[in-house]
Amino acid sequence: MSEKTRYSDAELQEFKDIILLKLEKAQRDYDIFKSSIMHSDGNDTQDTSPTFKVLEEGAATLSKEEASKLAQRQLKFIQHLQAALVRIENKTYGICRDTGKLISKERLRAVPHATLSIDAKNLQR
């Protein structure tokens, strides 16, 4: 019996469904981060109240920087998920880019944008 070289269309559809759900949530989270950075929710007094307390300003700046980092990280995650959808369309999804073997289903369910098998990932360390 020969070793499987790619996932079936049904298996690819299962992974696509997982990715689409994660992508939808990631996009919502990204929008929340972006909103908090821009203060577009309009429910605070950020623009109208006098800011005399330096510590509060520092905390607000730190919070904004953290939100910005989280937004950047979320955007990168979204891009990885979108790239995974392209690989599904090309029927190359789930193939380790180092070994050429199939990445385990368990790994892909946990990390649907993975491009390396566990063995290949461990060798990178």
Image (cartoon, rainbow, N blue to C red):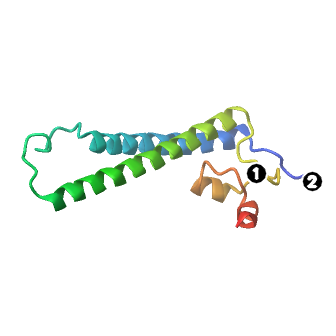
Residue with the most extreme right position: 1
Name the element at disc 2.
loop
Tell me where residue 72 appears, x and y as whole percent. Answer: 45, 46
With 5 as the anchor, is 26 left or right in this view?
A: left
Q: Which residue is mark 1?
A: 96
Tell me where residue 26 appears, x and y as whole percent. Answer: 44, 44
* On screen, residue 104 above or below 80: below
Residue toward you, 20 or 53 = 53
Quadrant location, the C terminus: bottom right
Q: CA distance from mark 1 to mark 2?
A: 21 Å
Name the element at disc 1.
loop
Q: Residue at x 79, y 53 (%)?
A: 98
**Residue count near mark 1 (Cα–Cα under 10 Å), binned few <14, some 14–19, many ≥20:** many
With 80 as the anchor, is 123 left or right in this view?
A: right
Label annotation for residue 36 = none
Residue toward you, 67 or 13 = 67
Q: Earlier in the sequence, mark 1 or mark 2?
A: 2
**Residue count near mark 2 (Cα–Cα under 10 Å), binned few <14, some 14–19, many ≥20:** few
Label annotation for residue 1 = 2
Q: Residue at x 55, y 45 (%)?
A: 18
Tell me where residue 27 appears, x and y as whole percent. Answer: 42, 40
Locate residue 10: give its quadrant. Answer: top right
* Amino acid type, label 2: Met
Residue toward you, 70 or 61 = 61
Q: Residue at x 61, y 44 (%)?
A: 15
Locate residue 93: give its quadrant. Answer: top right
* Amino acid type, label 1: Cys
